[in-house]
Image: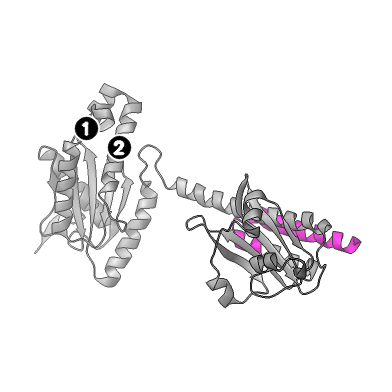
Amino acid sequence: MESQIVNCMDYFSGILKLMKSSNQYEQTLHLVVDRVVRLFRAQTCAVVLIDPHSEYLNIENSLGLSYTFCKAFRRKVAVGAIGEVLWTGKPILLTNALDDLKIAQDIQLEHPFECCACVQIAIDNRSLGYLYVDSRETNAFAKTDIPVLQAFADLAGVAINKARLHDENLRLNTVDADTGLEKYSAFLRHLQAGMDRAQQYDEHFAVLLLDVDNYKTILDTFGYETANKFLRELGALARSELRSIDACGRYGFDEFIVMLSRMEMENAIDFAQKLCRKVEATEFVSNSIKTTISVGVSTFPQNGKTMDDLLQTAKQALFEAQRAGRNNVFFYPAEWYASEGVMHR
């Protein structure tokens, strides 16, 4: 008994040390499963989680289960014995499978067992799944083992939650708070990926630079808070016109930048003109603000073979659109690179 306590403390210490240094929960789950198997000499141990998108149960990590079984495993979040574990947190302890064959069949994973235990994995009163362990021997687990298994399950829950919070923080760091669009640095990663794909597969794509024609008037008339609300609504309008393969980010204070993937110049110009008309016809912030936008268009490969060329050409085209009277779309119909300032025919 004393040696088991020492092993527990060593195992918990090792898992906590890993959790302190890493946001990757997979390694923690592997350690949890491995240490439970070692501590109880179990046949099988598995971390079974609820998929938040489908609400089905999936095996996230395990020992004693085949790859084929884990890959095919997909069960509904049931109302039976496992459902009770998930929703109430009440553990299952079956010291002899023959005592209740129905529950044994309900909770069994790949292999028949003589003894089994299941405890909830949860965080902030939200059920994430459960920790499953079984044995070929009857009475392999006792009531006194449930708190130990629950401690392992709690470590798994904290590790999963830590990883999810880390991912959420990374996502939020890419989003501009005022507009809800991507920050420019995040947008550039999409643009680089689009450039790489276009070069590899000989595709076209377009970059659009959008500027609000009368933003200073909006700011002076309505104030900072209303102007920010307007920018968010304008960003949402622009984003609503895009496909999943496109991207939109904040370029400047009142400027947005768009990447239209797999789109040639003619279609990109048509998109820009339709967007201008839609913005002109829209009343923003509870029908109190009317505005227009100017758009500069550059396309790959006509206006540049690099990101810098495309961005510089889009900036030059936007300047020309504003100089022509605003509420305009400007583009260079032939090959034209802003970096050179000359036509290529």
Label 2 crowding class (10 Å Cα cut-off): few <14, some 14-19, many 20+? some
Question: Main SS type for the magenta part?
Answer: helix
Amino acid at pointer 2: Glu
Of 165 and 304, the residue lying toward us: 165
Of 130 and 78, the residue lying toward us: 78
Q: Residue furthest top?
A: 221
Give the CA separation, mark 2 to mark 1.
Answer: 10 Å
Q: Is residue 253 visible?
A: no
The quadrant of the picture occupied by the N terminus is bottom right
Amino acid at pointer 1: Glu
Q: Is residue 5 magenta?
A: yes
Q: Against 182, is 345 above or below?
A: below
Residue under pointer 1 = 283
Q: Is residue 44 left or right of residue 161?
A: right
Q: Is residue 59 left or right of residue 282?
A: right
Give the magenta-colored segment's residue range: 1-29
- Residue 233: which numbered mark, if any? 2
Q: Which percent across, then down, holds residue 102?
A: 68, 66
Of 278 and 115, the residue lying toward us: 115
Q: Which percent across, then down, holds residue 105?
A: 66, 69
Q: Is residue 300 visible?
A: yes
Q: Which percent across, then down, holds residue 157?
A: 64, 53
Q: Is residue 345 left or right of residue 313?
A: left
The quadrant of the picture occupied by the C terminus is bottom left
Q: Which percent across, then down, holds residue 4?
A: 86, 63
Q: Is residue 140 left or right of residue 302?
A: right
Q: Residue at x 19, y 45 (%)?
A: 275
Of 243 and 196, the residue lying toward us: 243
Please identify the quarter of the rendering in which residue 137 is found. bottom right
- Residue 297: which numbered mark, if any? none
